[in-house]
Image (cartoon, helix red, strand yellow):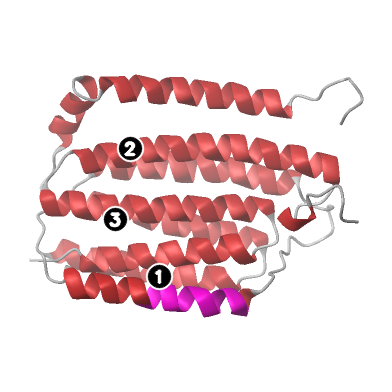
């Protein structure tokens, strides 16, 4: 019988990768994709424990997390495009009126 | 249990793509690597018996979110002849923090829940019943949230004619 620990390891790798992408990439769209990776890591953990405990709430939470991730991407991308039009830059640390 | 080897294979692909994602310079390759990760995650969900989540994952992420993100990347490109490179700041310093975090997480998981069995029988009819009975309020709220996000994104992107932008 298989065990769930490898699923949790994969989730940990995804979480760390998403956090590193958020911290290092100098592109606001990539930062949004890093947030998606974080949400997917949490989804994988929820699915793993849903398989372990046979509790239906895990799948439903995963479903609602996917829906919320879609909303976050739509609104976040709209904000990023707006900021790009305003500042003509895409790196998140350049979204500032004070710094030249 | 031939399916479990497919799960291991998918996890290997996900980990390899995640490591490559940290070092790739081209923006388009990065998005395609993320698409690989998301599709193989959907495959894992399918193999584990969560067919509804797996199909939703592939439909929404690979079909919806990443196409929208590709449009965002094209709209924020600097010019038609400039390659879509993205520079990285502080990659090694970030890895100096993140690698110990990964080791800590793996050690935590390995020390607590190693070797716990699971079963991969499907529960598709129960999901449909649960969405329509016990979870009908969150389901409807998710629909309203999607509508509000759609309208909000359109409202944010609509150009105003008051000279601000």
Res B120 visible: no
| C-alpha distance separating marks 1 and 2 | 23 Å
- Point out the frontmost of discs 1 and 2: 2
Q: Main secondary structure of the magenta part?
A: helix
* Residue B81 appears in the rendering: yes
Image quarter of the C terminus of chain B: top right
Tell me the subunit letter for badge 2: A
Residue closer to the observer: B21 or B162: B162
Residue A52's x, y, as percent?
Answer: 13, 54
**Taking B74 as reference, is B54 left or right?**
left
Which one is in front in this view, the residue at disc 3 or the one at disc 2?
Answer: 3
* Residue at image mark 1: B15
SS class, disc 1: helix
Task: Identify the residue shown where x is 82% and y is 40%.
Answer: A85
The magenta region covers B92-103
Which is nearer the N-term, disc 3 or disc 2? 3
Check disc 3 and report the residue beneath it. Answer: A45
Q: Position of residue A37 (x, y in %)?
A: 47, 55
- In-image side of B76 versus B10 (left or right): right
Q: Is there a contact, CB below 8 Å, between mark 3 and mark 2?
A: no
């Amino acid at each position: 019988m298989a065990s769930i620990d490898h699923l949790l390891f994969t989730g940990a790798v995804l979480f760390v990768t998403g956090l590193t992408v958020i911290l290092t990439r100098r592109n606001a769209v990539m930062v949004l994709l890093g947030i998606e990776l974080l949400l997917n890591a949490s989804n994988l953990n929820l699915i793993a424990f849903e398989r372990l405990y046979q509790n239906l709430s895990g799948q439903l939470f995963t479903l609602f997390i996917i829906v919320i991730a879609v909303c976050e991407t739509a609104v976040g991308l709209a904000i990023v495009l707006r900021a790009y039009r305003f500042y003509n830059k895409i790196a998140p640390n350049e979204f500032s009126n004070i710094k030249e | 249990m031939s399916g479990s080897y497919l799960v291991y294979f998918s996890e290997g692909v996900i980990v390899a793509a995640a490591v490559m994602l940290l070092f790739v310079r081209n923006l388009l390759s990065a998005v395609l690597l993320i698409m690989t990760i998301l599709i193989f995650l959907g495959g894992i969900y399918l193999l584990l018996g969560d067919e509804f989540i797996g199909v939703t994952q592939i439909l929404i992420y690979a079909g919806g979110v990443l196409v929208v993100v590709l449009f965002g990347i094209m709209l924020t490109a600097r010019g038609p002849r400039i390659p879509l490179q993205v520079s990285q700041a502080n990659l090694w310093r970030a890895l100096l923090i993140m690698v110990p975090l990964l080791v800590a997480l793996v050690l935590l998981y390995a020390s607590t829940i190693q070797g716990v069995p699971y079963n991969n029988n499907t529960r598709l009819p129960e999901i449909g019943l649960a969405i329509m009975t016990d979870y009908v309020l969150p389901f409807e709220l998710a629909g309203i949230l999607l509508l509000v996000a759609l309208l909000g994104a359109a409202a944010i992107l609509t150009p105003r004619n008051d000279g601000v932008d």
